[in-house]
Each structure stands twice: as C-alpha cells, then as structure tokens.
Image: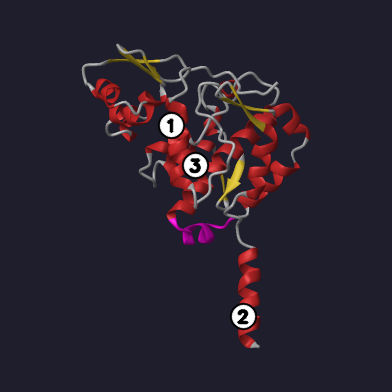
Amino acid sequence: MRWILLLTFLLSTNALGFDHTHSEWQKVLTKYVKIENSQSLINYNLLKKEKQLLNNYLQSLSSVKKAEYKSWESSKKLAFLINAYNAFTIELILTNYPLKSIKDLGSLFKSAWKISFFTLLEEKHHLDWIEQDMIRGNFKEPRIHFAVVCASISCPNLQKKAFTFKNLDAQLETAAHEFLNDRSKNYFDGEKLYISKIFGWYKKDFKNFRKFISKRMSKNKSIQEKIQNPKLSVKQLNYNWQLNEWK
C-alpha cells in the first residue's frame, strides 16, 4: 500500500512539472503560423485578440524555478530556451502591435532585444539574455541561429513544430536546411555565394561556415567543393526587417 501511495505521489508531482512537449506553444504555432512561399508568417492581429493560449504558455515558462531548470538534461534546457525566446518575441510584438518592424521598438540607446519585459528563471530579463547569455553562453550549437527568430522577413522561419528534447537534433537540422535552401536568404549562382548577414554577425560560432553551408545547401559533391573553395567570392545579402505578418 505504501508503494502505491508513493508511486501516486511521484506521478502527481511529475504531472505538475513543466510540460516538455511544449503542448501549449504547439497550439499557438498550429493556429497562428503558416508557411507561404517558404516564408513563415504569423497572424499577429488574430493572436492579439485570442491571447489565452499564448498567455498560458508564457505563464508556464515563467513558473519554472532555477533549481528545476538546473536539474534538466541539456536537450531539455535548450528546447526550453529556444521556445521561450520565440514565444516572448511574439509577446513583445503583440504588446506593441500594430508595428512595421521589431526594429521600431526600443530607443537609440536600447534595442528591442535589450528591453526587460518578462520573467524567466525567477528574474526579469530581456531577449538578448536568452540568446547571448543562456544559449550561446552555454551551448556550442551553431544551428540555434536558425531556430531562434526575430519576427522579421529575413530571419529564419518560426518553425510550425515546437522544439522538444526528444526531437531537438533533427529539428535543428531541419531549420538549418530550410534556411539555407530558401533562395531569398541564401543561394549559390555558380560563381558567387550569397549568404545571410547571420553568418557575418555570428561568424565565430561557425568554425568553417563554407563547409557548414555547402553540406546543407546541396547534396552534389561538385557544388559542395565549389562552395568550400576559400577563393570563392562571398556576398552578404541585405536584411529585411519587415514584420513577418500574416495579413
């Protein structure tokens, strides 16, 4: 009888813990995000009117204690941080919606990514804290740059599937592959490699960016070799900061 009671207690305690399937976030993505011509778009207008799903998820993120977070395995931590960054980015947009670009927020002295507006791990923080301090500071994973997104047209797509610890590696690879095969953001014309400014901003995160790109941009060995050639000319494309809005 004691074992039954103990098992019941453990199960109920576990049930009260954080949902690592991120089911509430998945509901938001399913209803308010669409992919059109390889571009993810978000229905900010409707989502602002129907915020309960998002609010539920944000509340669950903010309820996680430091001790609980520290007890998780690495993949759970990273999935949590990626989803949190994306969800709070949408929250920032909705708080200031309508607007044309996330770059319109903040001020001359403080960018949108430095605005402290949410609570995570028991403290008030800004988006840069999640990306720069928590993710880049603790994970040597260049593919996160195609998973955390900035609500803009030239950003990598906000994925339609919530990141989860069970599928994290495959999901990161999918995000990177999709971004590098979107010709509006990266492409190779046979003579020059055109790439996103992301590879310039975070160059030190990619030990060999040519190899990283070539392996995902093409399965053709000859094309991969051309892209990896250090003599190949590389040009960074202009970055479109227009809001990725589903109208």
| Amino acid type, residue under disc 2 in the picture | Leu
According to the image, label 1 marks what residue? 177
Label 3 sits on residue: 130
Q: Is residue 164 left or right of residue 117?
A: left
Answer above or below: position of 194 versus 214.
above
**Rendered image quadrant of residue 18:** bottom right
Q: Depth check: give the residue in front, 224 or 26.
A: 224
At mark 2, the secondary structure is helix
Nearer to me, 28 or 152: 28
What's under tag 1, amino acid-wise?
His
Few, some or many residues within 10 Å of mark 3 (<14, 14–19, 20+): some
Image quarter of the N terminus = bottom right
Residue at the spot of label 2: 6
Q: Is residue 67 magenta?
A: yes
- Which of pointers 1 and 3 indicates the residue nearer the eye? 1
The answer to whether residue 125 of the structure is visible from this angle is no
Measuring 63% from the left and 87% from the top, which residue is drawn there?
2
Q: Is residue 188 left or right of residue 126?
A: left
Q: Position of residue 103 (x, y in %)?
A: 56, 22
